[in-house]
Image: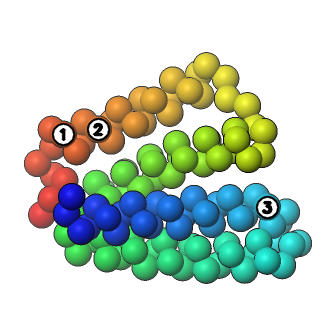
Amino acid sequence: MPVAYIYLVVAVIFETTGTTALQASQQFTKFWPSVIVVIAYGAAFYFLGLTLKSIPVGVAYAIWSGLGIAFIALIGLVVFGQKLDLAAVIGILMILTGIAIINLFSSSANH
């Protein structure tokens, strides 16, 4: 796996951590979750920036946001007890399918 994709996965992990902490911060009324939001989003954008040295912004952002959506939906389900209906599950699976298509068949995935 090229290092740019490792940076992208790390960016997604920090982004989902930040988004999870954002929910836990209760609109920035809880101190520590709010601190985690700022640090995690800062790290997410740093690693996304490193990714953009090798992967076009459109492709990187599509992967970043798509994986983020899937991970946050799963975290919402497991951690916060939020339910997903069939349409939401199908939509998320379509997003993940799109990411797979980009990576398997598109020559745009690398500069």
Distance from label 2 to label 3 (Cα)?
31 Å
Report helix, strand or loop for mark 2. helix
| Quadrant occupied by the N terminus | bottom left
Tell me if residue 26 comes above or below residue 106 in the rendering: below
Report x, y in % for residue 22: 72, 64
| Quadrant occupied by the C terminus | bottom left
Distance from label 1 to label 2 (Cα)?
6 Å
**Which residue is drawn at the image coordinates 56% and 27% (left, top)?**
89
At label 2, the amino acid type is Ala
Q: Which residue is mark 3?
A: 24
Report helix, strand or loop for mark 1. helix
**Which residue is drawn at the image coordinates 46% and 74% (left, top)?**
45
Tell me if residue 77 comes above or below residue 39 in the rendering: above
Other-residue count near label 1 (Cα within 10 Å), few / some / many at <14 / 14–19 / ≥20: few
Tell me if residue 72 comes above or below residue 104 in the rendering: below
Q: Find out whether the residues at labels 1 and 2 contact each other: C-beta distance under 8 Å.
A: yes
Tell me, yes or no, if residue 76 can be seen here. Answer: yes
Q: Which residue is mark 2?
A: 100
Report x, y in % for residue 98: 33, 36
Name the image colouring. rainbow
Report x, y in % for residue 11: 44, 67
Q: Which residue is mark 1?
A: 104
In the picture, measured across the screen, residue 52 lies left or right of residue 73, that is left
Mark found first going from the N terminus, 2 or 3: 3
At label 1, the amino acid type is Leu
